[in-house]
Image (cartoon, grey):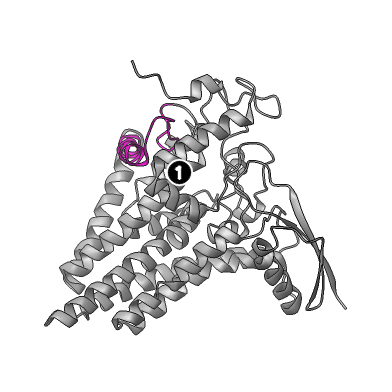
């Protein structure tokens, strides 16, 4: 009988996560050693381990979780419009993923080199194909909505609300995340596929601004994606968008112009094929997705400014298995900045840097709705981590002094 030993970590809101319980899983039977207060939070880990043993699946097959949202969106759009209750139920995948991300076990293992690369590339190409299909069926569903009476209008608005939640979250996780991965690839056609995905979100300028702005100027005042410690999320969002457009226009104006023409052509096609409401909803769900993306940027690098040179402490750590799978390795962000050309299954966890208390979905909800509370918590955490001024954990140029991280005094 196959036996697996699973080391589970109790999830708290502190900076250090010490092992809280150990389980020995034999087949479908689980023995718990010893009992503690974190058992409930580890039930999901036990279920996932038992499922892996039963199905004989390697742990890295969890990256297929990235397909859940786009497939749900496709079925939702093809089978719509829905009744009021049915439309609201279709948002359940989002809420379940948020809950799973909150309770998810840690995942720090690197993907083994023996894992087939066709599996990971297949996920990327599958996500790209699903986005192109969903783009069409979204317009078709919106054009089928009825507005003849009060009940029809309420039903239609409920469908649009469900679309905002389900499709908006999907675009961030299953469109922008794979686009980010593809645009860092060495292959010319893969980079163009990533750019095509960004054009479907009307965010093509990110292709230039991310590589030549964020990666090239990481942690500096010129970086559009590193939040300053005194900035609220809304202030950061406005500054980031403005600065990204400026960088794209300054560095590659012709490329930016081509992208704008194609994005305008897409919106014109949508307007002619499906009507004004469909074009509005396409723009709206894209805005929802972009705000989620910039929320991730907000907490990924918050307070990690540089004194000089390039730091190995470039991002906050997150070890949630659900976030790792859903965002295609984006949680291993520090390693991505050290080696941008690495594919997402090659990224490894970094032992340095402060630790996020929640997964990416929970963190995005937090900073969007209470960025002031997040800033207070993050500054306390940065102070508690006590980094050496100008040095990271490996003795390289790193975090600035804590006094430099704190907001300026009010005079």
Q: Is residue 224 magenta?
A: yes
Work out whether residue 182 can be spotted.
Answer: no
> Residue 333's spot in the image, x, y percent?
57, 45
- Residue 80, quarter of the rendered image: bottom left
Image vertical order of residue 269 relative to residue 208, above or below: below
Which residue was labeled with disc 1? 297
The residue located at (65%, 27%) in the rendering is 392
Q: Outermost residue toward the left?
A: 148
> Residue 97's spot in the image, x, y percent?
51, 65
> Residue 15's spot in the image, x, y percent?
63, 41
Secondary structure of residue under mark 1: helix
The residue located at (43%, 60%) in the rendering is 175
Q: Is residue 323 left or right of residue 179?
A: right
Looking at the rendered image, the quarter that the C terminus falls into is top left
Crowding at mark 1 (Cα within 10 Å: few <14, some 14-19, many 20+): many
Looking at the rendered image, the quarter that the N terminus falls into is bottom right
The residue located at (17%, 71%) in the rendering is 275
Image vertical order of residue 256 relative to residue 222, above or below: below
> Residue 402's spot in the image, x, y percent?
55, 23
Image vertical order of residue 219 relative to residue 292, above or below: above
Depth check: give the residue in front, 11 or 204: 11
Work out whether residue 297 can be spotted.
Answer: yes
Q: Give the magenta part as a residue range.
A: 221-249
The number of callouts visible is 1
Q: Is residue 153 left or right of residue 284?
A: left
Q: Is residue 230 magenta?
A: yes
- Residue 121, quarter of the rendered image: bottom right
Q: Outermost residue toward the right?
A: 1
């Amino acid at each position: 009988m196959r036996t697996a030993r699973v080391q589970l970590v109790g999830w708290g809101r502190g900076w250090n996560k010490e092992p809280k319980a150990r389980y020995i899983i034999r087949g479908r039977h689980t023995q718990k050693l010893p009992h503690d207060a974190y058992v409930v939070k580890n039930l999901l880990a036990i279920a996932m381990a038992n499922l892996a043993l039963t199905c004989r699946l390697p742990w890295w097959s969890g990256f297929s979780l990235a397909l859940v949202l786009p497939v749900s969106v496709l079925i939702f759009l093809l089978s719509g419009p829905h009744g009021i209750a049915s439309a609201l139920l279709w948002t359940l995948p989002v809420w379940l993923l948020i809950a799973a991300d909150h309770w998810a076990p840690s995942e720090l293992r690197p993907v083994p080199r023996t894992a087939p690369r066709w599996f990971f590339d297949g996920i990327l190409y599958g996500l790209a194909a699903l986005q192109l299909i969903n783009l069409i069926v979204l317009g078709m569903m919106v054009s089928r909505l009825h507005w003849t009476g009060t009940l029809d209008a309420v039903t239609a608005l409920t469908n649009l609300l469900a679309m905002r939640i389900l499709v908006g979250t999907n675009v961030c996780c299953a469109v922008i995340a794979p686009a980010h991965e593809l645009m860092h690839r060495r292959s010319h056609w893969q980079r163009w596929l990533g750019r095509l995905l960004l054009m479907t979100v009307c965010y093509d300028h990110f292709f230039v601004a991310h590589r030549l702005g964020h990666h090239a100027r990481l942690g500096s005042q010129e970086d559009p994606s590193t939040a300053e410690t005194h900035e609220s999320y809304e202030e950061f969002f406005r500054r980031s968008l403005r600065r990204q457009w400026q960088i794209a226009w300054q560095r590659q104006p012709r490329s930016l112009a081509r992208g704008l023409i194609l994005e305008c052509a897409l919106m014109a096609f949508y307007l002619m094929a499906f009507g004004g409401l469909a074009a509005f909803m396409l723009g709206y769900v894209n805005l929802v997705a972009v705000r989620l993306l910039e929320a991730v940027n907000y907490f990924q690098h918050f307070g990690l400014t540089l004194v000089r040179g390039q730091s190995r402490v470039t991002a906050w750590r997150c070890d949630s298995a659900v976030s790792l799978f859903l965002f295609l390795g984006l949680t291993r962000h520090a390693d991505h900045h050290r080696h941008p050309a690495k594919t997402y299954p090659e990224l490894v966890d970094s032992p340095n840097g402060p630790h996020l208390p929640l997964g990416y979905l929970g963190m995005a909800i937090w900073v969007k709705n209470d960025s002031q509370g997040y800033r207070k918590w993050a500054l306390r955490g940065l102070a508690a981590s006590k980094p050496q001024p100008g040095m990271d954990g490996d003795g390289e140029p790193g975090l600035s002094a804590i006094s430099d991280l704190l907001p300026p005094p009010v005079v």
